[in-house]
Every structure is written in structure tokens, then in C-alpha cells.
Image (tube, rainbow, N blue to C red):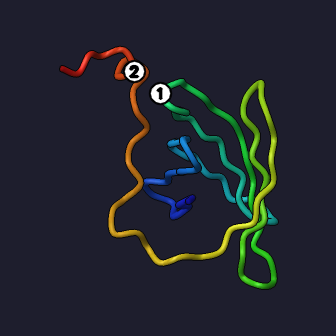
């Protein structure tokens, strides 16, 4: 799930939770993102374009890692907002 609203932009995909910083382009939106994948810090870049059928077509790249394309369809707003990315320190906290 990706939220590109211009305020409080967030991304959630599998175990990735990230904050998104968007820039409008002539053909869509480019963005950088920074967050955590299962508590490990990750960041990257991406871009999306609005297709004629109303869906988003995009690409995402993990810094020093993989790159992938995606197609996203508009969904109802979730009942709960996308959570904040976890802190790397939380990974090492003991929970008794």
C-alpha cells in the first residue's frame, strides 16, 4: 500500500514500512523513501505514472539492492493509518 497524498506520505509493502518524500514531475510523481525492512534500515527511490485505466504504474529501487516494477489500483482508505517504520533500536530491545 502506498499513500501519496502530499501530507503524511507513507509506504507499506510486505515487511517494508517507510516515509515517502514526493516530487511532482511532468509525467507523474518521483519519490524517495526511507524506512525499515523488518527493523533493518533501508532507503531508495521510485516513480509512478497515472495510466489511462486509472491505475498507477511505477518502479521502485532499494539503495544498493533490487529494483522492481508494480501496478497499483486505488483502494478504500484503510481503517488504520500505515504505521510508522520501526526503529532499528527496537530490534534489540528485550521484551519480558
Q: Which residue is mark 2?
A: 91
Q: Are marks 2 and 1 in contact (CB under 8 Å)?
A: yes
- Disc 1 packing (10 Å; few <14; some 14–19; many ≥20): some
Q: Residue at x 43, y 54 (%)?
A: 8
Q: Is residue 16 left or right of residue 25?
A: left
- Residue 92 against residue 80 in the figure, above or below: above
Quick one: SS at disc 1? Answer: loop
* Mark 2 neighbour density, 10 Å: few (under 14) some (14–19) many (20 or more): few
Q: Residue at x 68, y 35 (%)?
A: 44
Q: Is residue 7 above or below residue 60?
A: below
Image x and y of residue 95, in percent: 23, 21
Figure quadrant of residue 54: bottom right
Residue drawn at (81%, 66%) of the image: 27
- Residue 63: give x, y in percent of width and height: 73, 29
The residue closer to the viewer here, 87 or 51, is 87
Task: Determine the residue positioned at 36% across, 14% down.
Answer: 92
- On the rendered image, what quadrant is the N terminus found in? bottom right
For disc 1, the marked residue is 39
Q: Position of residue 34 (x, y in %)?
A: 56, 35
Amino acid at each position: 500500500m502506498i499513500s501519496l497524498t502530499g501530507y503524511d506520505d507513507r509506504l507499506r509493502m510486505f515487511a517494508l514500512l517507510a516515509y515517502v518524500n514526493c516530487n511532482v514531475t511532468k509525467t507523474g510523481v518521483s519519490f524517495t523513501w526511507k524506512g525499515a525492512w523488518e527493523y533493518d534500515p533501508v532507503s531508495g527511490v521510485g516513480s509512478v505514472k497515472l495510466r489511462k485505466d486509472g491505475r498507477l504504474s511505477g518502479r521502485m529501487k532499494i539503495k544498493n539492492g533490487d529494483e522492481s516494477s508494480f501496478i497499483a489500483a486505488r483502494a478504500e482508505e484503510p481503517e488504520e493509518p500505515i504505521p510508522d517504520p520501526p526503529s532499528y533500536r527496537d530490534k534489540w530491545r528485550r521484551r519480558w
